[in-house]
Image (cartoon, rainbow, N blue to C red):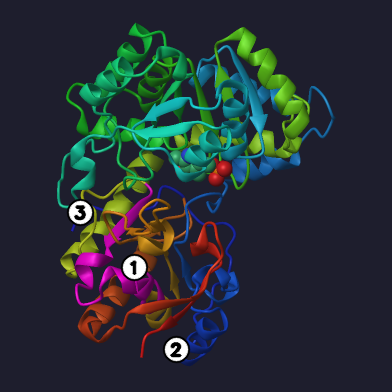
Amino acid sequence: MPTYPAEPFRIKVVEPIRQTTREERERLLAEAGYNVFKLAAETIYIDLLTDSGTGAMSDGQWAGIMQGDESYAGAKNFYNLQAAITDIFGFKHWVPTHQGRAAENILCNTLVKAGDMVPNNAHFDTTGANIRAAGGHPIDLVIDEAAIPSSTYPFKGNMDIAKLESFIQSTDRERIPFGMITLTNNTGGGQPASLANIREVSRVYRHYGIPFFIDACRYAENAYFIKLRETGQGDRPVIDIAREVFSLADGCTMSAKKDALVNIGGFLCMNDGTLFEAVKQELILREGFPTYGGLAGRDLEAIARGLYEGLDADYLAYRLAQTAYLGEGLLAAGVPIVQPPGGHAIYVDAGAYLPHIPREEYPGQALTIALYQAGGIRAVELGSVAFAYTDQETGEIQYPPLELVRLAIPRRVYTRSHMDFVISTFSEITRQKDALKGIRIVKEPKLLRHFTADFEIIA
Ligand SMILES: *Cc1c(COP(=O)(O)O)cnc(C)c1O
């Protein structure tokens, strides 16, 4: 077992959670069409659906909430957040947004034209969707190791530099409005990119005159992975690493619901003054005046304080160790996971865990259902339910490479005993896993079916 540092906080407010009986859970699941998105959160014991906006704020952040200046324009909290962003991110211009996808939406509406292409290590689903909505194509160029669950390569979020160069050389420069890298790579299991790789990515984009935007959601976790794993980086303060990373780019999109430790918020940064003028126009249309961008003054204050708390080395050591602890515990219990454990989540390889369930019968959904039945635990399927689609030309179903179930860990919310409970629930499932049945979809919408589809267990 890896070391698990004692939580670097003590608990001042508690939120009761209640375990239901297995009987209750069987009934609730049937009522929800065996879709855990449709369960009332109060009926869940441990909720690992997402780490987005689900974290606990500190007493300092709550004190900041009471100092919210709710003036329409020029609230003092805007200036506080501006000072934090200038200090850590260092970009010349920025605007607040209500969450990360709003920053992506404004960036894409301003820069992406029909037929454009945007390279990335791997686009998050909202980023890809915003590029497509503007008529563009998201291009994923992550290294090959990212697709091998058992590979313990320390920087599986790295961009493949050779693929990036050949993509740019074979594409009309006019078709690439900007390039990205996502830190950490959420889609690929919360895996980090190395500082050496980010420097190379920056060098290539700059060589070809392509503006470089970082999807910065988990930049602090990425910076701590660099400190832990990259030669020569171990003695640097985390904030220093973060500052260097952003100095290599021309801007960033940020969901503050991740490493800024708040429940809502985001921002968009850039150096280009002309772009900033266009962004402000879009912002006023969609989010609000440039000093609040769809957020209350108190939200801006909580982000300003959360940005520094998210970079604290003791917090990050605990955060990454907690995730690793869950991952190692599952491996020891015979559960295959995407290795090595990422920053914010453990991805279980449900296809390998339940080899008797074919992918047409959704092994990931079967495991998601079993987790709730056995322990009141909510996870999310990221396999064929979420990603399989019918090819319009051939009429064939295209399956994703892996049948994954994600266990995302909310920040500063659950303790080691909660992680132990998740591991022991898995052990219980493992003992009877050969009896788990496949799943059938009863009713599905056209788009993003995993959120609202109804399922049944195949008898
Ligand atoms: C969450 C997330 C986003 C979108 O942010 P929201 O605040 O949910 O809109 C974008 N990119 C990555 C990598 C994310 O994890």
Q: Residue 421 lies in what quarter of the image?
A: bottom left
- Element type where label 3 sits in the image: loop
Q: Which disc is residue 22 wearing?
A: 2
Residue type at mark 3 is Pro
Q: Quadrant of residue 202?
A: top left
Q: Alpha-carbon neighbours of circle 1 within 10 Å: few (<14), some, or many (≥20)?
A: many
Q: Which residue is mark 3?
A: 2
Mark 2, secondary structure of its residue: helix
Q: Nearer the viewer, mark 1 or mark 2?
A: 1
Residue 5 image point, x, y percent: 30, 50
Q: Earlier in the sequence, mark 1 or mark 2?
A: 2
Q: CA distance from mark 1 to mark 2?
A: 20 Å
Task: For mark 1, give the secondary structure.
Answer: helix
Q: In percent of the image, x 43 and y 52: which residue is there? A: 392
Quarter of the picture holding the C terminus: bottom left
Question: What is the magenta range?
Answer: 344-370
Amino acid type assigned to the residue bearing label 2 in the image: Arg
The reply to whether residue 309 is visible in this rendering is: yes
Residue under numbered circle 1: 364
Outermost residue, right direction? 71
Residue 262 colored in magenta in the image:
no
Identify which amino acid the numbered label 1 is placed on.
Answer: Gly
| Disc 3 packing (10 Å; few <14; some 14–19; many ≥20) | few
State if disc 2 and disc 1 touch (CB < 8 Å). no
